[in-house]
Structure formats: structure tokens, C-alpha cells
Amino acid sequence: MSRIIPRKRFGQHFLTDEVVLDSIIKGFSPRRDDQVLEIGPGTGVLTGRLLDHLDHLTAIELDQNMVNHLNQRFSDRPLSILQQDILKTDIRSPEVSGENSNVRIIGNLPYNISTPLLFHIFDSLDIIQDMLFMIQKEVGLRLVAKAGNRNYGRLSVMAGLHVDAEILFDVEPESFSPQPKVTSSVIHMQPRHPAVEPRDPKKLEKLVKAAFSNRRKTLRNALSGMITGEQFKHAGIDDSLRPENLTPADYLHLSDMV
């Protein structure tokens, strides 16, 4: 089998540490009849481990070289590979979810798309059972941060409304080839059921984005033109606070009221 060379434009860092792979499988705990979607399987080191525990696995990979490699490596295994851009993939489509309303998602996410990818996945949480991702540690800390924490931001708010997130363990650069310049974290996320449904999801996203684009300002100034002082007062929120002082529930309440 030909040697696979990581491609920078896809942000490829291949996991090579067997101990970490064992820990990922233990943390995910796949069962035979699970409907599992793997994002960015790369060379297939995790794919092979998953296939040992599953009756079938679906994987999404953008790089044609990797698709060819995976098709060759797992030609006799129950693996369906879709060559697609995950950011443009409809997770609800039958070829991805198998018309299953209980999909489990796993993957080593490319650092350069991890945040937009998480927002994309949040749009399909009603059919997702849980997720286990390897991401940049900095992103993981933002995902689990609470109001008032220095890592708290837009991603923290949106994640806090939709999922319960827990960092399972960190992974050092030495576990990859080539080595990234940052530490990674393996994080488990479980959608909240029943889901929190804002009256206008787009308005909520716009409000949170505007707030944290001006996080050093007070809410009064950061959201000037979007929310009046009277509306803040009616919502019971002090507009002299800063964006990081409001909980996800506060942002939901403010958005719904407006």
C-alpha cells in the first residue's frame, strides 16, 4: 500500500498513538447496531478500530487520496465512504444517517474548520445521540466554559444551549504525524432533550455574535442598535454588564423577548 503524505490544505495530522486510540474507543463505547458517522477518517487508524465493534460504519472524507486509500484498506469491511465536504453535507440525508434518528458522530476534526463544523452539526442535534471529537484544546475549553470564565464566548453560549459537553482527556502533539503545534482534547457531547428552541434561531445567533464581537464593551454598547435600554430592563438584565457575564439562558431570554 502506497505511503500517505499529509496535506496541509486539509489540515491533516494523523493520529499514531495506540494508547490514545484505545482511550477514544473506550470513551465512545461503540455497540454493534449503532449508526455511526466518522468525520475525516484520514488513513483509517480509528476507522479500523470502530469497524471491529460495528456492523456498519459511514465515513465522510474530502481528500480523494484518502478515499482511495480507505477503499483499498477496507475493501472487505462494512464501510461506506462518502467523498464530501462535511461543511456542505446534510447530516439528515439517508446516505449519511441511514434514516436513523439516533446517529452517533465521531472524528478527529481539522483545526481550521472545527468551530464552523460544530455550528453546522448543532443544526441536526435532534437526530444525534452523542458526539466524540478530537479538537484543538483551546476550542474544547471554549466549549465547556461557563459564564465569567476567560474562555467563555460565542461557542460557549451556543454549545451551552444545545449540549452537555465534557473534556475526557488531552492529547499531546507527539501522538500525531506530523506533530501539530498545539495540544488537542477529546471531548464528548450529548444533545439536550428536549432541545432548547429559540423563537428565532437566526436572531439568537446574530445577537450572540454581535455581543462577543465587542466583548470588552458593556452590553449597552455592544448591542446598541439591536436592543434598547427599556428592553434590557424588561428582560431583567443589567446592561452595564459585559457579554461574558450572561449565561446561555440569559441570551436565549433576551433574544426571545426582542
Image (cartoon, helix red, strand yellow):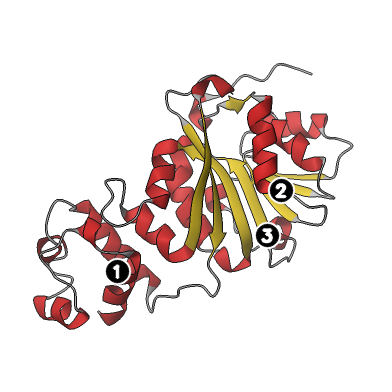
Query: Which quadrant of the structure image shows residue 92?
Result: bottom right
Question: What residue is drawn where x is 33% and y is 72%?
Answer: 252
In the rendering, at what x and y percent does residue 128 appear? 62, 62
Labelled disc at residue 103: 3
**The C terminus - image quarter:** bottom left
Helix, strand or loop at label 2? It is: loop
Q: Which residue is mark 2?
A: 29
Q: What amino acid does circle 2 point to? A: Ser
> Which circle marks residue 251 in the picture?
1
Structural distance between the alpha carbons of marks 1 and 2: 34 Å
**What residue type is disc 1 on?**
Tyr
Q: Quadrant of the N terminus?
A: top right
The amino acid at mark 3 is Val
Comparing marks 3 and 2, which lies closer to the viewer? 2
- Looking at the picture, tell me which residue is in the foreground, 253 or 171: 171
Q: Earlier in the sequence, mark 1 or mark 2?
A: 2
Q: Residue at x 50, y 59 (%)?
A: 164
Give coordinates of residue 10: x percent, y percent.
52, 32
